[in-house]
Amino acid sequence: QVQLVESGGGLVQAGVSLRLSCAASERFFSRYTMGWFRQAPGKEREFVAVIMWSGYTSYADSVKGRFAISRDNAMNTVYLEMNRLTPEDTAVYYCAADRSTDILTRTFRRQNEYEYWGQGTQVTVSS
């Protein structure tokens, strides 16, 4: 059972940057596909970013150019650097992990493509 623990959320003003972290308990973390999702009040959880074991990354259009996902395999940690935050980025941010690396049949943009989830960290952006 992989445990994921997010941290780094908080209340910030629009325009600033914030970095989220997700620490994984998994020994073979480097082989996992890691994703970030978010859920705003009254909305469904949505894809934000994904990083493969190879370092390949992909982003939702709404965050492309502002957010950056990265991983430190030695620390079993994945990060989400969020820049130029807006009130529309307000949400609970979730880290997700899956053992699959099959990019031929998976997009890794859907919740059901991930086996493990963290508890989430709240990000609130004030205007």
Image (cartoon, rainbow, N blue to C red):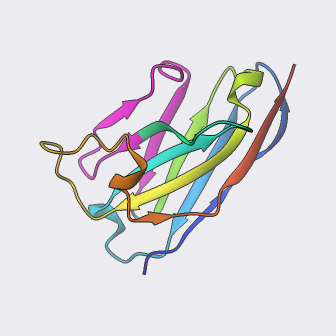
Give 60 or 54, whichever is nearer the viewer.
60
**Magenta span has 123?**
no
- State the image quarter where residue 17 is shown: top right
Q: Which residues are magenta?
A: 50-73
- State the image quarter where residue 119 is shown: bottom right
Q: Quadrant of the N terminus?
A: bottom left
Q: Quadrant of the C terminus?
A: top right
Residue drawn at 45 percent across, 27 percent down: 60
Give 29 or 40, whichever is nearer the viewer.
40
Up-down relation of residue 106 to residue 116 (above or below): above
Q: Position of residue 61 (x, y in %)?
A: 45, 20
Give 75 or 87, whichever is nearer the viewer.
87
Give 115 or 18, whichever is nearer the viewer.
115
Q: Position of residue 110 (x, y in %)?
A: 38, 44
Residue drawn at 21 percent across, 54 percent down: 101
**Magenta span has 67?**
yes
Residue drawn at 84 percent across, 33 percent down: 12
Quick check: 7 left or right of 1?
Answer: right
Q: Is any part of residue 8 visible from this angle?
A: no
Q: Position of residue 118 (x, y in %)?
A: 57, 63
Residue drawn at 35 percent across, 32 percent down: 58
Q: In this figure, what is the number of numbered marks?
A: 0
Q: Is any part of residue 72 visible from this angle?
A: yes
Q: Position of residue 13 (x, y in %)?
A: 85, 26
Quick check: 27 left or right of 54?
Answer: right
**Quick one: which residue is furthest to the bottom in this view?**
1
